[in-house]
Amino acid sequence: MYVPVAGTRYRIIDGVRRAKAALLAGHDTIPAIVRDSAGSELGDCELPVDSLLSARETIPRKSQADESRWKRAVMGANVWPLTHPPIIVIPVARGWPLADVTFDFGGSSS
C-alpha cells in the first residue's frame, strides 16, 4: 500500500484515457499503482484525480481504434466504484494537469 503525500503530483505512465474519463464522469479519486522513476513498484492506492499529470497535452481520437479505446474508457468510468485496471503513475512535477488535457480529433486547425 502506498500512502500519497499531500501536494505530490503524479505523471500517468499508463491510463491517461481511463483517468480523463474518470475525471469527466465526476470521480474524485482513481485506483493507481505508483512506481519510482526506475520502474520499481512503490505500492497501490487511490489517488486524487486533481493530482494527476499527463505526459501529453492531447488524447488522440483520430482513428477508429482511438475512438474505440476512448469509448471503453468512458464505459469503465461510468460506474462506482471504478472497475477498470489501475493506472500506472510516477511521482513527478512535470506534465499537463489532467483537467487541461484535450482531445486531438485530427483535422486542421485553420
Image (cartoon, rainbow, N blue to C red):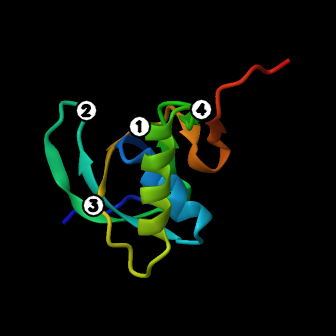
Q: Position of residue 11 (x, y in %)?
A: 42, 40
Residue 66 vs 49, above or below: the answer is: above
Residue 27 image position (x, y, % from top left): 53, 71
Left or right of 7? Residue 83 is left
Q: How much space separates mark 2 and mark 3, taking CA atoms?
A: 21 Å
The first of marks 2 and 1 along the sequence is 2
For marks 4 and 3 on the same chain, the one whose residue lies earlier in the sequence: 4
Identified by mark 4, the residue type is Glu
Residue closer to the observer: 51 or 84: 84
Residue drawn where x is 49% and y is 50% of the image: 70
Q: Classify 81 as above or below 39.
A: below
Residue at mark 1: 92
The answer to which quarter of the image holds residue 92 is top left
Residue located 41% across and 67% down the image? 76
Which of the labelled discs sits on residue 57, or is there none?
A: 4
* Residue located beneath label 2 in the image: 37
Amino acid type for the residue under numbered disc 2: Ser
Residue 95: x percent and y percent?
A: 52, 33
Q: Residues within 10 Å of mark 3 (few under 14, many from 20)?
A: few
Q: CA distance from mark 2 to mark 1?
A: 9 Å
* Label 4 or label 1, whichever comes before in sequence order: 4
Q: Can residue 9 be seen by looking at this rendering?
A: no
Distance from the alpha carbon under mark 4 to that under mark 3: 22 Å
Secondary element under disc 4, as helix, strand or loop, is loop
Closer to the chain start, of discs 3 and 1, is 3
Question: Which callout, 3 or 1, points to the residue nearer the camera?
Answer: 3
Secondary structure of the residue carrying numbered label 3 = loop
Residue 109 position by quadrant:
top right
